Image: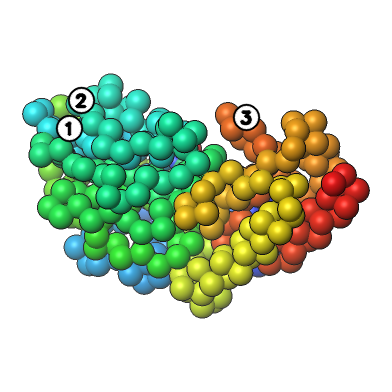
Amino acid sequence: RAFNFNAGPAALPLEVLQQAQQEFIDYAGAGMSIMEMSHRSSIFEQVNDGAQSLLRELFGIPSHYKVLFLQGGASTQFAMIPMNLLSAGKSAAFVHTGSWADKAIKEAKLIGETTIVASSEADKFNRIPSLSEIQLPEHAAYLHITSNETIEGTQYAAYPETGDVTLIADMSSDILCRPVDVSKFGMIYAGAQKNLGPSGVTIVIVREDLVAESPKSIPTMLRYDTHAKNNSLYNTPPSFSIYLVGLMLKWVKEKGGVAAMEQFNRDKTKLIYDAIDQSGGFYRGFADAGSRSLMNITFRLGSEELEKQFVKESEKQGFVGLKGHRSVGGLRASTYNAVPHESCKALVEFMADFQKRNG
Ligand code: PLP
């Protein structure tokens, strides 16, 4: 298998893929694949409920929160959140941390008033603003943060305290990478395709009171209450993706749960950050030390030419996905939960060898 450092869709554990392969044609003796089955069948309901309850257990989701499996990606949430939760006279507050926060802000602006309460744009988004920089306006409907900026490789070390104001987090690229106190958030959402499984399903964890009744003017599929009242089965769900999310969660549980994932991720990323820091300036980390991500490691070399050569040679040696996002350039290693320690070790060895030949 490749040393897969893709940013998303990203690596899945081999064991998960093998189990899916085994069950692909005949799921649980039903004589058909899970993807051929009615979403109203009792077998699929078990898959749906099973994935939901495993996520509740692993992430410590309180019982007064709904867990929804939606479609349209995290990008659709950028619009659904203000449509459902931003009323006239209120403002959607944002911390502007990078490319994904930016997209969320642009969508919210189409719906209503927005306020940027802190930004690291002047620093090219190489850091998460410090919590003391975040001042909420009085009429804030909610504060939206991007827990991990996938492109810049920055991540909140601690989350802002917002008192009575609802805190909403886009955790698309770091959900389940470490334990989180879910009760501090009104809503957490994530496209599944990085840490939770394949693309096609978006996880929304939301406090019940926030989704009890959406404004009447919103189309049915874009209302949280539609999905909350129907256990995410209002229409045909992405059943195969939900099934794979269930397998992925089972894998996380078998590996010791979310706290074990954090340790595992810290060990992996330390290898790579140490390699950057100890390279005498040959490799230069993009993110400020206090904002470094456990999931996306962004770094640069002395010239774009050298970066291109790094990518080309790495590909020849079985590495995939190390080219940085086109908007920031450089290199990026995405080290999601499913990326094995051995891949990171191999990368560090490659980095040392590349430096020896080009330093
Ligand atoms: N938010 C973050 C932090 C992301 O990394 C991504 C995708 O890379 C998205 C949102 C968009 O997700 P989707 O492609 O599921 O719409």
Could you say where residue 81 lies in the image, as x and y percent from the top left? 26, 38
Q: Amino acid at mark 1?
A: Ser
Residue 287 visible (yes or no):
yes
Q: Are there few (<14), some (14-19), or many (20+) residues within 10 Å of tag 2?
A: some
Residue denoted by label 3: 326
- Residue at 41%, 46% (x, y): give it: 128
Classify mark 1: helix, strand or loop.
Answer: strand
When the figure is inspected, residue 183 is found, relative to residue 174, above or below; the finding is: below
Tell me the tag on residue 315: none
- Residue at 46%, 73% (x, y): give it: 259
**Cα distance in 3D space between marks 1 and 3:** 32 Å
Tell me the tag on residue 112: 2
Q: Residues at badges 1 and 2 in contact (C-beta under 8 Å)?
A: yes
Mark 1 vs mark 2, foreground winner is 1
Mark 3 vs mark 2, foreground winner is 3
Residue denoted by label 1: 91
Residue 247 visible (yes or no):
no
Classify mark 2: helix, strand or loop.
Answer: loop
Could you say where residue 359 lies in the image, as x and y percent from the top left? 85, 46
- Residue situated in front as seen by the camera: 169 or 230: 169
